Image (cartoon, rainbow, N blue to C red):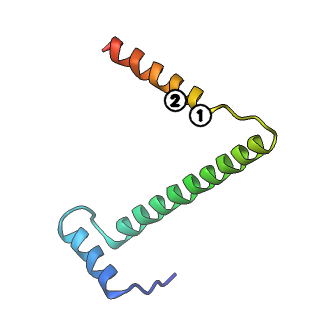
Amino acid sequence: MNVNLKPEYEKFIQEQIANGQFNSVDEVMNEAIKLLELRVNRLEQVRQKIALGTEQIANGQVTDGEIVFARLQEKIRAMTEES
């Protein structure tokens, strides 16, 4: 596979190699693909959580915001006391 990169990306990659962060263009590209894969997976997880939350709202499965914040404050207080 041949990939055409913008000159600024080529420069960035060469700088990473020159700085010793990576040993080759292949290493840089492999790391970039891994990070892209993580980003795509996280985005999908967020979309699924949004869909679930939207469904729960539609079904009336909600908790009053004041109750949520009170619970969070209690957890924070308890964690602070443990320290």
Give the vertical position of 55 relative to 16 (above or below): above
Q: Residues within 10 Å of mark 1 (few under 14, many from 20)?
A: few
Q: Residues within 10 Å of mark 2 (few under 14, many from 20)?
A: few
* Whether label 1 touches label 2, CB < 8 Å: yes
Give the amino acid at mark 1: Gly
Q: Give the label on residue 65, or none.
A: 1
Residue depicted at x 62% and y 50% = 45
Looking at the image, which is closer to me, 17 or 58?
Answer: 58
Residue depicted at x 55% and y 52% = 42
Residue depicted at x 40% and y 61% = 31
- Badge 2 is on which residue? 69
Q: Position of residue 50 (x, y in %)?
A: 66, 50
Q: Position of residue 38 (x, y in %)?
A: 51, 55
Residue 62 vs residue 40: left or right?
right
Secondary element at tag 1: helix
- Number of marks in picture: 2
Q: Position of residue 13 (x, y in %)?
A: 30, 74
